Amino acid sequence: MTAEHPAVTAVGPDPVDPAPAASAPWPDLVAAVAEECLAVLLKGADEDWSRRAGDLDWTCRQTLDHIALGLVGYAGLLTARPRDRYITLFASIDPEASVPACLEGLGIAASLLGTTVRVTPGDVRAWHPWGHSDAAGFAAMGIVELAVHTYDITRALGLSWTPPDGPAAAVLARLFPDAPPGHAPSAALLWCTGRIPLPGLPRRTEWQWYGGTP
């Protein structure tokens, strides 16, 4: 999860989709976002990855580890289905690997999450500190990790990129019921996660998604 910002009180639950996760487009959205993120990050492979990623305390390279940890962790939570704790498996990328090889590892992590979401029944719930969630919720969380932290890294590397609007709209509907209307989904997602201000809305200093389902 994106824990570099303090959490705020979660808002009320959104409606639950009774359909199995396999019937939703979430696995395909995870794959599509991962492909786009990896492609733009590869363009900056020769840049200085020791720079801080956006306003994070991590370097660009360390941020890749954080994303991989989150993606594999979400897949693990859906697999083990704990009710009150995080899983005991932690993922990281070879610290000696080149950036292209690191991105390969990130692609593996995204594939693990997408595959797990695809085969997880719709009634499965697993623990998360921001609300026990279903497969769709964890897929949306994975997309946030990929998209928002790719934005952080591209800012540091001088690359112009924003999250794709289609997946961003799906994530907003699933995790951010308080998202402001009337804005492009990509901009609203970046505002919801404390990255940018919007007209009339100052940049958030605290934020949290709502992943819970009954």
Image: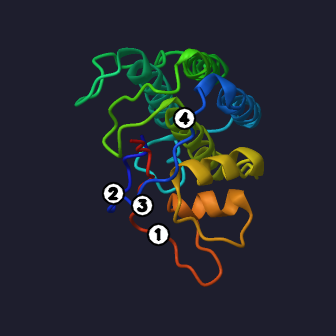
Task: Report which quarter residue 87 is drawn in.
Answer: top left
What is the x, y in percent for residue 114?
Answer: 61, 22
Measure the alpha-carbon separation of dots 4 and 1.
21 Å
Q: Residue at label 4?
A: 142
Amino acid at pointer 4: Gly
- In the rendered image, the residue lying farthest to the front is 18
> Is there a contact, CB below 8 Å, between mark 3 and mark 2?
yes
Which part of the image, by quadrant, shows the C terminus?
Answer: top left
Q: Residue at label 3?
A: 207
Amino acid at pointer 1: Arg
Amino acid at pointer 3: Trp
Badge 2: residue crowd in 10 Å (few <14, some 14–19, many ≥20): some
Badge 4: residue crowd in 10 Å (few <14, some 14–19, many ≥20): many
- In this view, the residue in front, 146 or 161, is 146
> Is there a contact, CB below 8 Å, between mark 1 and mark 3?
yes
Q: Secondary structure at mark 2?
A: loop
Q: Residue at label 2?
A: 7
Ranked by sequence position, the earlier of labels 2 and 4 is 2
Amino acid at pointer 2: Ala
Ranked by sequence position, the earlier of labels 2 and 1 is 2
Q: Secondary structure at mark 3?
A: loop
Badge 1: residue crowd in 10 Å (few <14, some 14–19, many ≥20): some
Is 109 located above or below residue 43 in the figure? above
Measure the alpha-carbon separation of dots 2 and 4.
18 Å
Q: Is residue 89 visible?
A: yes
